[in-house]
Image (cartoon, rainbow, N blue to C red):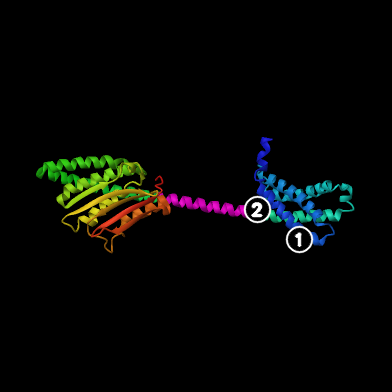
Amino acid sequence: MKRYAHLFEGLTVRRVAWVTAMSVFATACVVWFFLNTYLDLLVTALCVGYTSMVLFTIAGNLRQTRVPREVMQVLAIVAGSFIGTVLTGFVKGRDLTQMFTERLAGVTISMSLGIGFGCVVVAWFILREKHARDQARIHEADSERHQFEKNMLQARLQLMQAQVEPHFLFNTLANVQHLVETDPASASRMLDSLIRYLRAAMPQMRESATDLGREVDMSRAFLEITRVRMGSRLTFDLDVPESLRQKPFPPMMLISLVENAVKHGIDPCCDAGSISIRAREEDGKLTVAVADTGEGILPKKGTGVGLSNIRERLKTLYGNTARLVLQENHPHGVVAAIEIEDNPAV
């Protein structure tokens, strides 16, 4: 029996209830046109309806390719109407010979009504399945588009890294070379920080996911290098609980905010400034903020390529469950925070 079980897939209680309701409705519609009682016609409707339903389900599950499934289902309705009418005769204890002689007109009407209602059902199922297939294609197209956008943003990120990393590396090495001649101790500290930065950054270059701890370590090394270059003009502090360091976090986003804070916040305006990195998790939402005491939010700020890329990547990776928020840092400066709800895996 198991080898034929697939033929009855879809024969659910819901479908039985639906056919029962349709039979009751059809009986109520036609009872006024016949001399039969409502109950007599209901028995006929249920026999034809249930038989057609079973054959319709089997026809829809047949594993064949020569005859379209819709044609098989229409033929199943015709066969179900005939067999159901014959079954009605058995249930009512009628003479089958009389059914196809003296009562042929009534039998023909019963079969015609069964076929008519059955074809309506077939048309409804065909339209519903077509709608379901269309929706599935739309969903698949949206998924492919989403994945394409994600791949495009990842490629743009890698291109940006390919452009920025050599520039940063060469500038740092040039500073080291200069400090070797003027301040060997500072040159040594900068070189140590550069080594820590590269150790933290190199894995991210080849991966699409990382954790908050590695991003913080890379940002710390970057700030240490920058502090050697800027001297007393820059101070920084980090407040990232150990329990949050293993949280998944998108690569290269935190350091982009840190670079932005140095380049657009502290460097252009201040004799001295500070940058802080904070991480908190409340009610399932991870918030990682970079605050600076620099120039503040200017009209052009927040429209740069770096911040736009971060917003686009967050939307692609997390949809509406993540965002980049820019706020004033009183008395002056900017707080840029990445908020990720439920902290889903990147």
Question: Quick check: 291 left or right of 227?
Answer: right
Amino acid type, callout 1: Cys
Q: Where residue 56 is drawn, which disc sits there? A: none
Q: SS at mark 2?
A: helix
Position in image of residue 228 (x %, y %): 17, 47
Disc 1: CA contacts within 10 A as few (<14), some (14-19) or many (>=20):
few
Q: CA distance from mark 1 to mark 2?
A: 22 Å
Residue sitting at 81 percent across and 49 percent down? 88
The question of residue 190 being in magenta is answered with no
Tell me the quadrant of the picture where the C terminus can be found.
top left
In the image, what residue type sits under mark 2? Phe
Residue 311 spot, x, y in % from top left: 36, 55
Q: Residue at x 25, y 50 (%)?
A: 276
Q: Is residue 103 shown left or right of residue 320?
A: right
Question: How many residues crowd around disc 2 within 10 Å: few (fewer than 14), some, or many (20 or more)?
Answer: few
Magenta stretch: dominant secondary structure: helix
Closest to the observer: 343 or 160? 343
Identify the residue under disc 2: 125
Q: Nearer the viewer, residue 312 or 10?
A: 10
Relative to 94, is 301 above or below? below
Can see residue 68?
no
Q: In the image as oriented, which residue stretches furthest toward the left? A: 182
Magenta residues, start to end: 124-150
Quadrant placement of the N terminus: top right
| Picture residue at 34% right of the left edge, 41% below the top | 246
Residue marked by disc 1:
29
Residue 331 percent coordinates (x, y): 23, 60
Residue 222, percent from left and from top: 23, 46
